[in-house]
Amino acid sequence: CITPIPEGAQQLQKFPQRLFAVRPRILEGTPGVTEEVYEEDKKLWKKHVDTYKRVNKLIGKSRYRNIMDMNAGLGSFAAVLDSPGSWVMNVVPTISERNTLGIIYERGLIGIYHDWCEAFSTYPRTYDLIHASGVFSLYENK
């Protein structure tokens, strides 16, 4: 799936700077996502990941190489992990209120759409860490 950059968008920054720069889709007007929402999301996930690292000292080290974020949102969890030896599969649930996969791609991250009512196509133990913030709330009444 190739997602074109919005017309009139400036050149994307080099990695890793592009992880934190405001994405062209946000500046162009992604429904439900403003520059302020994007910045707040980065701050929130920085705070959460810092807390995770205090509780589990191995996060951000080479122990967790394959990570899945089951409800990736804007991809901020993956961006703030700051672990060059890791990669994160960012999953945007198909029932999400916001279509954010394009923003995830523009950050230089990988991701997919998925309906968690169906089985995921890879063996779950393929991942060393599974992050599931807010997933159960999405499917609460399904």
Image (cartoon, rainbow, N blue to C red):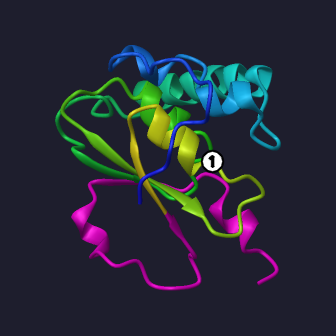
In the rendering, at what x and y percent does residue 128 appear? 26, 54
User: What amino acid type should be assigned to the residue bearing mark 1?
Assistant: Thr
Q: Residue at x 49, y 49 (%)?
A: 3
Q: Is residue 21 left or right of residue 127?
A: right
Give the image quarter of residue 55: top left
Q: How many marks?
A: 1
The answer to if 124 sits in the magenta stretch is yes
Eyeballing the image, is 73 above or below 93?
above
The crowd level at tag 1 (other Cα within 10 Å; few <14, some 14-19, many 20+) is: many
Residue 100 point in image, percent of width and height: 63, 47
Secondary structure of the residue carrying numbered label 1: loop
Percent of width and height locating residue 97? 78, 57
Tell me, yes or no, whether the highlighted magenta stretch contains residue 12: no
Which SS type dominates the magenta stretch?
loop
In the depicted view, which residue is nearer to us: 53 or 12?
12
The answer to which of 16 and 124 lies nearer the viewer is 16
Q: Which residue is mark 1?
A: 100
- Vertically, is 16 above or below 49? above
Q: Is residue 4 left or right of residue 22?
A: left
Residue shown at 73% from the left, 66% from the top: 138
Would you identify the image quadrant in which residue 43 lies?
Answer: top right
Give the quadrant of residue 127: bottom left
Residue 126: horizontal and vertical position, in percent?
23, 65
**Quadrant holding the N terminus:** bottom left
Q: Which residues are magenta?
A: 113-142
Does residue 35 lie above or below 113 as drawn?
Answer: above
Location of the C terminus (image quadrant): bottom right
Q: Where 96 falls versus 79 (above or below)?
A: below
On the picture, is 24 further left or further right than 84?
right
> Along the line of sight, which residue is nearer the eye, 25 or 104?
25
Which residue appears at 81% of the width and 44% of the height?
31
